[in-house]
Image (cartoon, rainbow, N blue to C red):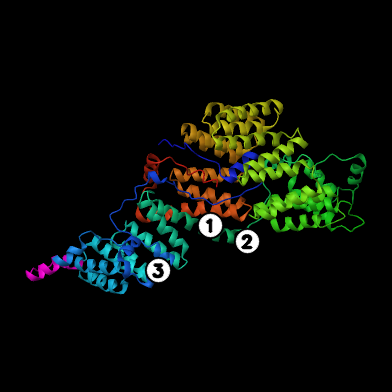
Amino acid sequence: MAYKFPSIKLTKWQLALVLGTPLALGLGFYLYNKLSAKDLDNKTTDKDVDSENKKAGKGKTSKLKASKTQKKSLSIDGITEEDKETEKRKKLAELENERLSPLKEATIYKNEGNACYRNGKFDEAIIFYDKAIDKCPSEHKADLAIFYQNRAASYEMLRKWNKVKEDCTKSLQCNPRYPKAYFRRAKAYEATNEMSDCLDDVTATCILEMFQNNNTIMYADRVLKQTGREDAEKGMKDRVPMLPSKNFINTYLRSFVADPLQANMSANEVTDLLNTKDDRLYGFARAKHAMDEQRYDEIIPACTEEIESSESESQYKSEALLLRGTFHLLSGSFTEAKQDLDAVINNADADVKLRAYALIKRASLHIQLEEKDQGLADFDQVQKLQPDNPDLYHQRAQIYILLDQLNEALQEYEKAIKIAPNNAMAYVQKCYAEYRLGLLAGDQMRLLMIMNEFRNAIEKFPGCVECYSLMAQVLGDQQQFQQADQFYEKAIKMAPENASLLVHRGIMMLQWKGDIDKAISLMQQAIDVDDKCELAYETLGTVEVQRANLDRAVELFEKAIKLAKSQAEMCHLYALRNAAIAQINVTRKLGIDMSNISALAQAGIASQTMAADTK
């Protein structure tokens, strides 16, 4: 089967990796295909409870207005334009002494119940539905399913959630593929905070409706986000801190051009650092040497040695706090990172540069914790301390990019480049910000000029891999896939250990050729190159969902979850995993081949499963 991914967009997390930004704003998104309004056929044969209640006018009861849940109620089945004629036929039949069959008599009771429901008389409606169920022969399963579902609708309006669940379950025993009963029971499960069962039922509804009902999809999206949040709260408590891969850390460190922790030292400083204790490098000297040798796992314990030394022995305590705080930040240990960074920021005797970089990194921490205002306030403090710090403007620009504040980002990039004109990463990221602004404005002339700027960036900084990767991204966005692939190939040759490049090239293969095998091969190669590449696990997992390989998808999402650092990021990944688990539960219970559902969805709509809204 050919897979079509014509309009895949980057999530915030994917965009961050393209830009080399060490942030993960994991905004939750729904796993399934989302439809535009024009793609939907919302016509039904049933009347919505809301429309029925509007027709009832003065017959509304206060119970009908009681809650938002009531406003969202499903329709009751079996209501037709002929309901008013039913009574006439019944009376006529009685006059003619016509003997009614049990099913016809049950149908009359059902219609009486419908009339009461429309008039807000829910208790009376239940009585008539009781009679309909009692009279209906057991072999008429489809009718019984409707009667139980209609009675459940009345119980829903009375907020008798256990009764709703009981009747929906009986309805589904009569008709196991009745989407309306699943949806009503899902809402009852939500009302009683049984979110796993709720998710299974709303997933069943989506599948049985072939993902063609946008209202159901939106409800499922909300349920997924809630289950994701709940699981993420638990997951963060049990999370084991873990440093990312060497490539990720190297990219992060390269995004700073004036960081005092990476600056070359004077001869005297080197001599001081090389002082040994017990014939070995000690404290900050050991940490600095480990950083130079890319032995990043040794940095936190080495810094701790320096910090816990006596005042007479510790010459680089502030530097050690800043470095340890940086690596706590990279490992997702946000509490510990903030403590170390706060200690530097609040130390009036610490070097101004150290305090400034502690603020920059604390700003990043706040953004990852979705504390935007506090993060931007830290950047403002840096500007007061060091108005000519190029990293201030570069790092703030990257935050603005992720926040979709493109004009502000562009201004920050321009300031960064003015102070440090040889900052290759800032230069090409500025081109990217300009490209997105030109795209939004629909200014073709501006876009042509920006493409020339990208080429100038490559000529000016031929050793900067970000120049090639962002050029590839932009060309792919313009569907110039052949050229984009050439730039991806160059970037991968320059940085073969950069797993995210392989992932993005795989995504492009899906957009370009629908080549699922090549895409999977590239994503698996990314995992082989970097087994800590969260993006590779997440993206490959989403592809496997699209191929209906749900067990494999769950396995991949679980691996990505272990690598997640922020709660928002973890919430997003749990939502993906939970969606896949729910599909497994439903398809096995109903005996549905999910690959057929996927094929139908692919034929009907342009799949955007692999990338969620970037808003």
Left or right, 503 with reference to 347: left
Front-lying residue, 73 or 130: 73
Instruction: Say what amino acid the circle numbered 2 marks.
Output: Lys
Q: Looking at this rendering, what residue extends furthest in the left direction? A: 96
Q: Helix, strand or loop at disc 1?
A: helix
The residue tagged 2 is 237
Q: Position of residue 152 (x, y in %)?
A: 33, 67
**Which quadrant would residue 525 be assigned to in this image?**
top right
Give the Cα separation between the discs numbered 1 and 3. 30 Å
In the picture of the structure, the residue carrying the numbered disc 1 is 228
Residue at image x 56%, y 32%?
443
What whole-number distance in Å separates the C-alpha atoms at marks 3 and 2?
40 Å
The disc placed on residue 65 is: 3
Start-end of magenta stretch: 89-106
Question: Is 240 rendered above or below residue 193?
Answer: above
Q: Mark 2, residues whose alpha carbon is within 10 Å: few (<14), some, or many (≥20)? A: few
Q: Amino acid at mark 1?
A: Gly
